[in-house]
Image: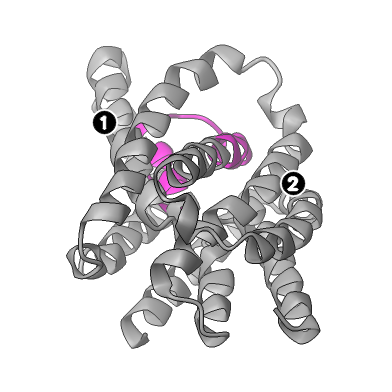
Amino acid sequence: MSPVEFAALIAAGFAAGTINTVVGSGTLVTFPTLLFFGHPPVTANISNSLGLIPGGLTGSHGYRDELHGHGATLRRRLPMSVAGSAIGALLLLVLPSAVFDAVVPVLIGVAVLLVAFGPWLQRQAARRQLDSDGNRRDLALRASLFVSGVYGGYFGAAQGVLLVGLMSVLTTEPLQRLNATKNVLSAAVNLVAALVFVTVAWHQVNWAVVAAISLGSLVGGYAGAKVGRRLSPPVLRGLIVVIGVGAIARIVVA
């Protein structure tokens, strides 16, 4: 790997770590960068997943105040996310990429709509007293986290948008807390997927790529937390929608 490529991947990792912490979809920075430098798609995807783990950890740590007192909630949500992630990572290794290519823009589009109309949907749910049916809502949330985990383990681009969108509708928690939860769940999804890749497809990991992206994402996660925690809910919601639409455009054009 040339010094120019290594520096470019560090910069891409920093941008991805920042974007992932604030919104999600940082993979849409690093993954195209890896393809630009000639890395095979599967190798790029696997190495990228490993490289973004440090950013997920630092971003989650940066949101620790929003997570204070909600350990029990995270423990309930993590199992479905990590189970889905393991399945998604295995699907990446056994299925042709065309299977998910058509589905990814649709998933991101649904997530953007959920984020955009989340407050309205929450008000409608309250009027219909759906909150009283805690079991049904919890079941829907668990199923949604499993599906988003599968998606995150397979590719992961904009999984943060998808997670915030789903939780915006299926919970009544404030947006900044949902963003903090999203960071933890996304980091767990990437970590589990990485463990699967290292165990099953060690030969497809480019460790130089992992090192470069890790260096950038490590710092980017902290930077993203400082930015994201200062945004008002309307601004954060608008940023999620804009980046989500951009993610769809990037995938469709590609």
Question: Are there few (<14), some (14-19), or many (20+) residues within 10 Å of tag 1?
Answer: some
Residue 169 shows in this picture:
no
Q: Quadrant of the N terminus?
A: bottom right
- The spot of residue 85 in percent (x, y) is 38, 39
Which residue of the protein is positioned furthest toward the front in this rendering? 203
Mark 1 or 2: in front is 1
Front position in the image: 220 or 139: 220
Say the numbered circle drawn on residue 229.
Answer: 2
Q: Amino acid at mark 1?
A: Ala
Q: Residue at x 74, y 83 (%)?
A: 2
Residue situated in front as seen by the camera: 174 or 150: 150
Q: Does any portion of residue 17 appear in the rendered image?
A: yes
The CA span between labels 1 and 2 is 28 Å
Which residue is the site of mark 1?
143
Q: Position of residue 198 (x, y in %)?
A: 50, 44
Q: Is residue 113 above or below residue 84?
A: below
Label 2 neighbourhood size at 10 Å, few (<14), some (14-19), many (20+)? many
- Helix, strand or loop status at disc 1: helix
Specify the amino acid type for callout 2. Answer: Arg
Residue at the spot x=53%, y=54% of the render?
49
Q: Residue at x 68, y 65 (%)?
A: 208
137 falls in the magenta region: no
Q: Position of residue 248 (x, y in %)?
A: 37, 73
